[in-house]
Amino acid sequence: MNPAGPSPAATRTLTVADGAFRRDGRPHQIIGGAIHYFRVHPDQWRDRLARLAAMGLNTVETYVAWNWHERRRGEVDFTGWRDLARFVREADAQGLDVILRPGPYICAEWDFGGLPAWLMTEPGPTLRASDPSFLAAVVAWFDAVCDVMRPLLATRGGPVVAVQVENEYGSYGDDAGYLEHCRAALVDRGIDVLLLTSDGPAPDLLASGTIPGVHATVNFGSRVPEAFAELRAVQPDGPDMCMEFWDGWFDHWGEPHHVRAAADAAGVLDDILTRGASVNLYMAHGGTNFGLWNGANLEAGRLQPTVTSYDYDAPVGEAGELTAKFHAYRQILERYAAHPLPEPPALPPRLAARQAEVGEWVALLDCLDVFDPPRRAPLPLVMEELGQDHGLVLYRGSVLLPPDPPPLVLEGLADRATVLVDGAVAGVADRNDPAAEIALTTPGDGRRSDLAIVVENQGRINFAQAIGERKGLAAVRLGRRFVHGWESTALRLDAAGLTGRLRFGSAPGAAGPVFGRTSLRLDEDPADGFLALPGWGKGFVWLNGFLLGRYWQVGPQVTLYAPAPLWRPGDNEVVVLELERPGSSVELRSEPDLDGGRQVAQGVPAAAETVS
């Protein structure tokens, strides 16, 4: 714990005056770092916050992900892992101020940028704009989240010193009325601390994303004087703040792992602070996209799903590692600390390596009774029509194949499909393929052939103008002819207790995607571990019923972080759902592998410095 302890309420109020931030009237330099409570197991919040305090931060910042709290419209949850107030109090116990960013949009490489998937049910609203239906949903969200935030505000004796309005809006649109609506909605609900905006370092982004009377900040990874000059162009009196100093970067499946040299990042941090500016490290601790919560980007028409790890090459690693970047930052931040910094906690214990053979199996198509009943319609129903946000959809129909059948065309595929014809795998199609179609090699014999198509939602786009997609299938054609008459089944992989309802046997049964089960025994106390699936293709892993996330042999990520709170003494059940190519064993490793020995990408992508 920070020896300074929680600050008295009288010292918490943050204001702007005479070109400076002031905390209880005295000049103040915000030295903050991002940590997302929804990416860290709640039993580890205290540990990770203690590491950030030991690094020398005086503030932590977190997004508040709307869809994490309201997966189904009107059902808002701030309990358990979603207990925002508990997280904020944990930060307070470390002597840290808190900045909250409640959206409604957050980006964050998080599914749909934090917007709930139910917004995309028919008819969908115009997102992030002055659309009455969207504004009504936003107001209802603010009603709920402001009730949680209000008692935590510095003006009420809490640690929350500032709240951000929307997020990087200048990269998306120019509806000033929408931004003002968001600002007024927060104020009207008692949010009376300092309000902020954040945008990328370009004139049009800042001009479109700022709000009169709201303090503007800028996001960047380098070129400090140029970025702050752009900020001063819209806010001449200061004070300057980098709300997101990109000290690392995130990874996409099939692309290199990103790293940023500690000396390079520390040099930019030193430059920011030497100028008297405030800063928020993005990220200070990245965490994990547990379950199915990863987002995706769209670049030149290609989907780029984000990997399960959100390590971000941050100073505090995904499993709590104190990296070279941590120590370089701490050496700088000691100069700005009001009190001696606490000693950093030791690295959390690790489990010893071991391996387990997978000997129990059940085909996905043989256990459909554990999922929702199917719905019938002339065309396939997308996820949103099924009331589903994540996971898989199974489409079943039939088609009369001619002797020389044309390809099976999957219209509106989002995102990847395994296709079975008469119980045999005919192929895999991906939305990034030049044509989302399956060549049919078996000639028709006058009978109708059964079709089963398993579609994976690989993560909703979280940034820029492509947000707001629907997942699943829009239609299926045999050549030019539509195939009608479909059963659509929502396969909710993150449903509570799913793996406990599966009935395993010694052989897979039906072809196609398959569940496998094994056990890893602990004769020692639970600790952190890392699961690897050598020889497997693409799929999902559960540990003791908890969905850790996705794996994919294309890399770069090889191991999945399995934190200590998920393990138990004795036998630990591991369940794998393999979509394409089952392996035979599961490995528990004592060290993470986020690059698979592949070439890594150095630094922040250049495009990010001009388009936030």
Image (tube, rainbow, N blue to C red):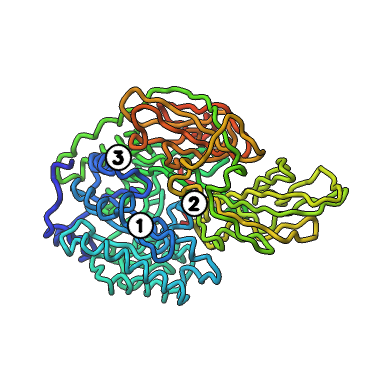
Q: Earlier in the sequence, mark 3 or mark 1?
A: 1
Q: Is residue 193 left or right of residue 501?
A: left
Closer to the camera in the image, 407 or 599:
407
Q: Earlier in the sequence, mark 1 or mark 2?
A: 1
In this view, the mark in front (3 or 1): 1
Residue denoted by label 2: 295
Residue 466 seen in the figure: no
Q: Secondary structure at mark 1?
A: loop
Q: Is residue 62 left or right of residue 549?
A: left
- Say if 201 sits above or below 318 in the image: below
- Residue 550 in percent (x, y) is at 51, 41
Residue at image coords 70%, 54%: 397
Tag count in the figure?
Answer: 3
- Residue 459 in percent (x, y) is at 52, 51
The dot on residue 64 is 1
Q: Are marks 3 and 1 in contact (CB under 8 Å)?
A: no
